[in-house]
Image: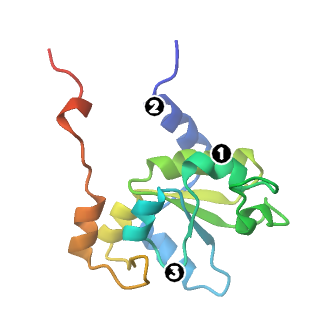
Amino acid sequence: MPLRYADLLAQARAAVRELMPWDLAPQLAAAAPPLVLDVREPAEFAALHIEGALNVPRGVLEQACEWDHDETEPSLAGIGDRAARAIVVVCRSGKRSLLAAHTLRQLGYEGAVSLATGLRGWNDAEQPLVDAHGHPVDGDTAEALLAPRLRPEQRRPRG
């Protein structure tokens, strides 16, 4: 039987540690903070993100981790000891980040973890977010930007 999205998430959750927003905040203030890797699409990132985060969309993550690709991200490909580098992967809800952290671990980034609840939970914990220009994004604006936007045709048919 083929796997479903929920199955992939369950597999990733079994292999990847998840970090809560209130646990990440003090880590970011530490002398050697983790790399915050935001795997949302560029437009989502531009609207709001954690200050200092690196944006690498999940769709190009594998290429971004290796040299000599159009999508190579030196901040990832240039990590000498992949196993030792602390990376916190973030997205809107914590699902894309969970799958991306699982992929990173397969690529040798053993310190990759996922931000549980994603930026929605980060915002709920009243942690700061900024826009593309580095200006603060207030919590209410962030909540609206992070809200799910299911169209009627995307909902499971009833009947």
Q: Residue at x 77, y 51 (%)?
A: 108
Amino acid at the residue labelled 3: Pro
Task: Count neighbours of disc 3 (C-alpha within 10 A) and say few if under 14, some if 14 to 19, many if 20 or more.
Answer: few
**Distance Cα–Cα, label 2 vs label 3:** 32 Å
Q: Is residue 113 above or below residue 27?
A: above
Q: Residue at x 54, y 72 (%)?
A: 53
Determine whether the residue tagged by mark 2 lies in a helix, strand or loop.
helix
**Distance Cα–Cα, label 2 vs label 1:** 15 Å
Of marks 2 and 3, which one's residue comes earlier in the chain? 2
Nearest the viewer among 81 and 138 is 138
Quadrant of the rendered image containing residue 152: top left
Q: Is residue 106 left or right of residue 146?
A: right
Amino acid at the residue labelled 2: Tyr
Task: Name the residue that disc number 2 marks.
Answer: 5
Task: Count neighbours of disc 2 (C-alpha within 10 A) and say few if under 14, some if 14 to 19, many if 20 or more.
Answer: few
Nearest the viewer among 115 and 143 is 143
Look at discs 1 and 3 and give the one toward the viewer: 1
Question: Which residue is outermost to the front?
Answer: 70
